[in-house]
Amino acid sequence: MPVEQRWSTAQVEALAPDPASLRNARVVTGQFTTTGLIGDVLWGVCRGYQVAADLSGPAFKCSCPSRKIPCKHVLGLLLHWSSSGAGAAEAPEFVTRWVAARAARTSRSPAAAPDPVAAAKRAQGRADRVAGGMTELRRWLDDQVEQGLAAAGRSGPAAFEAMAARLVDAQAPGAAGAVRRLGSIAGIGPQWADRLLGELALLRLLVSGHAHLGTLDPGLAATVRSRIGFPTSAEEVLAGPKVTDRWQVLGQVEVDDGALTSRRTWLHGSGSDRFALVLSFAAPGQPLPADLVPGTAFRGDLCFYPGSVPLRALVAERTSAAEPFGSPDGAGPVRAALSRWSALLAAEPWRSDAPVLLSGVRPSGAHLVDAAGDALPLAPGHREPWWLLAGAGAAPAAVAAEWSPAGLRPLAAWADGAFVPAAPPIPDPSASRDPELPPELLTAALVGTGRRPWSGHAVQVGPLSADLGSPVPESPAAALLEAAAVALTCRRAGVAPESGRAPMAAAPAETVAPRPAAASARLAQILGGGAPGGGHNEQELLAQWLAAGAGRGGTVPPAILPALLAAGRRNISVRADLAKVAGRRGAWLAGQRADWRWLLSEAPAGTGVTNEVAGEWATAGSAERLGLLAALRRIDPDQARALVESTWAEESSENRARFLGAFGPGLSLRDEPLLERALDDRRKEVREAALELLRNLPGAALGRRMAERAHAAVRFDGAGRLSVEPPAELDRDLRRDGVGAAPVRGVGAGAWLLEEVVAGTPLDTWTDLDPRGWLDAAGGHDWAAPLLHGWAKAAVVQRDPRWATALLGSDAGRLREAVRWDLHLVLPPDRLARLAADALRAEDGTAQRLLALHPGPWPDGLSVAVLETVEHRARVDRHTWQLGELCRAAGLAMPPEYADLTGRLATLLDQAVDPARVRPVAELARTLTFRLEMFQELS
């Protein structure tokens, strides 16, 4: 049967015949050119040497001349597999021949029973090596305190690495890892000396436990052996007693240290009230097992690793399928959780964390408060629990977490029967940390017992005093480390909950029904990066989902809100639709965080967040005023304008420009006096904001002034000919009305003034002829260029499709490129689609740009033209990037009903062209299918 789980590094190191072989193995680990796994046989090629290891034996084979078993090449292969997994290469002949030979030998003779004498000899040899390492570690620990921790803080991690390497050689990998971690503490960060002394003390306690291993309780002895690094095989664990229960999967924590990805999965037994920890590991780029899904429960058997408080377990058997559960069993108040933690720490003082299940807790700043008013702090990285505020709305909820001296690390919550996974931690380097050890201990350790001996027998730990008795210490350093271990354990085990913290007020009840579960799951998939096509597609697919969702009504699940609000903060184009599906919970959540307050300005009337705008204006800051103004413009534009006028003189120019930018909704001639006043502002950005509004305000005096100038400059004479006389000069009034002094390169001053005056004139004032007639009249005139450009710019600003169609129909070639392409944005979608289809069939280079301008969905004629072009390019084009660009554009704008046709096209091409050209077409079909399912779910 193939091996199911890779060995740990400690398991591999335990096979080393001597420290030299292990050191040499680390050198050759990265020299394997090919590796593979066939059944239980791991093989590889290292610098020409043929290496294999039968993991079920274990048994080893190597073509090198070494007489050591296993040799450095075999150990290197196992270390490589432990850290990076095996390759997928086909097994060469030397492997298959060896496997066949071993199988033949096994079939000829029954398997020999393991030699108990040899096994005992090997075990005794390792025990002796570990004992030597522990003795050296004890001396090293005492030396650190005797010399003073101040010196260790200055020396860096080298001294810790040297001691860790010695422990690896002594086959004590667990203790080696603990020593190596000390190098990342010494001299680094706040309270480093307090943390370092605490870890040194716990290591000294571990050394003492090893020295008395034969007299310890079997469970505690197993814990000590495990902490040192003695492995317990899965077979041994599964052969032990089984605990049958209904196991609820509370949550998971993944840690990626670059060399290995590990996952901690916490379970809780409904009947036994036992917690269980399942560990899994994967090499970089490899998936972790997905058999334990948080928020689900199953019936089955677990086998626990031996220990003083067994927590780590293996799933031995499942007797039922996994099903969601509404709330975890066994949740309790804060004090019960701390009592359980204290009992755990008394039995296993080396533990740094433990699972807790809290019932009915609510956020209060960076704390969780239960119904009795007892509070526990959240750990750094988790102190802003937006995921919990969104999911529970500050109502009482059950929370699963890991408790550590730094605080709670939440795993998940259950609110109203819904499972809400915790968000990943956010780095928080500024988080403060309180010292855990008495100052007299820390002072003595920093100076060093060699300079200032320490002989105390009692230490003060908070309000308590711990009496150490009067044992005969090995040295002052040993006595200090013993006292520190007692003090640290007492401090951690005796932690008490905080009181006097008021929980947050709950969010208002939602009044709108939620969207269907399938549609909400699709939205979560988009926000989580699971949509086809990468980041660009995700933004467009999010916009399409929100537009469709807003049109159909309903709210999104509360747990999605933090990710959704973060997306709206980055992409302002989706905010209006987002506000319609965020509901009252979304508006409440946005009010708690400054960079989400934009939602308040987008929230539709009736959500209860815009009724007190006027009263808040006087005390609000500039950012809050902008949000209040945008909200009020939708409800009462006149009152909004009055608020701006009341503080206009005292506002900065930046604020004045931003406020005017919010005047779009409800714009009317009643706003004109304020906008005309803004035309005289000293700052350019304020004047430009006012001009943009006035140019789009029907009946505004600005339009009348510009029309008067334009019709004085352009008119028909008595014979019906066009007569043009540009403005003579750029006077003060023209400047005030938005005519700039710097013409486009190559355009004369008179032509520029004429172009700008015509551009600022309302197009509905050109009543003598229709657009086509005016263009014909100007066609052969000397001033045709400024007239055409003026009308084109006016069509863009005033969004006039009649003028845009006329200009692009006959005079597009005479327009500057930027102006010409701006006109395409004004065209009706069907006209733009015809232009794009014609360009595709003519293989015009502008086709891709025209497609990008079409807002979608594309009409059938354009969609068919695109599919024809896709097939043609896939068969004949040399440059696949052109095909890829076309498929990416089509995936977002083509009607999703073309998914089936596109999928059949991809299948047809797969049999005829290079796979690199099929890939974009298959991705197009996948995107269209995704959109088709998305819209079906929303409807």
Image (cartoon, rainbow, N blue to C red):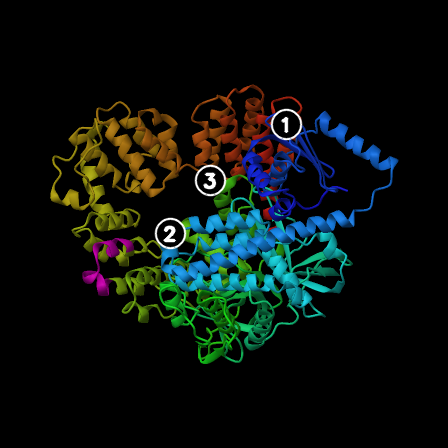
Q: Is tag 3's residue or tag 1's residue first in the polypeptide sequence? A: 1
| In-front residue for pair 34/650 | 34
User: Would you say residue 267 is visible in this rendering?
Assistant: no
Q: Which residues are magenta?
A: 645-658
| Circle 3 SS class | loop
Q: Residue at x 58, y 68 (%)?
A: 356
Quadrant in which the N terminus is drawn = top right
Query: Is residue 366 one of those drawn in magenta?
Result: no
Q: How far is the residue under mark 1 from the one under mark 2?
A: 42 Å
Residue with the mark numbered 1: 49
Residue 410 image position (x, y, % from top left) = 53, 63
Tag nearer the camera, 3 or 1: 1
Q: Residue at x 30, y 49 (%)?
A: 698
Dot 3: few (<14), some (14–19), or many (≥20) neighbours within 10 Å?
few
Q: Is tag 3's residue or tag 2's residue first in the polypeptide sequence? A: 2
Residues at marks 1 and 2 touching, judged by CB atoms closer than 8 Å: no
Q: How far is the residue under mark 3 from the one under mark 2?
A: 63 Å
Q: Is tag 1's residue or tag 2's residue first in the polypeptide sequence? A: 1
Q: How many marks?
A: 3
> Quick check: 483 left or right of 638?
right
| Circle 1 SS class | strand
Tag nearer the camera, 3 or 2: 2
Residue 924 image position (x, y, % from top left) = 57, 35
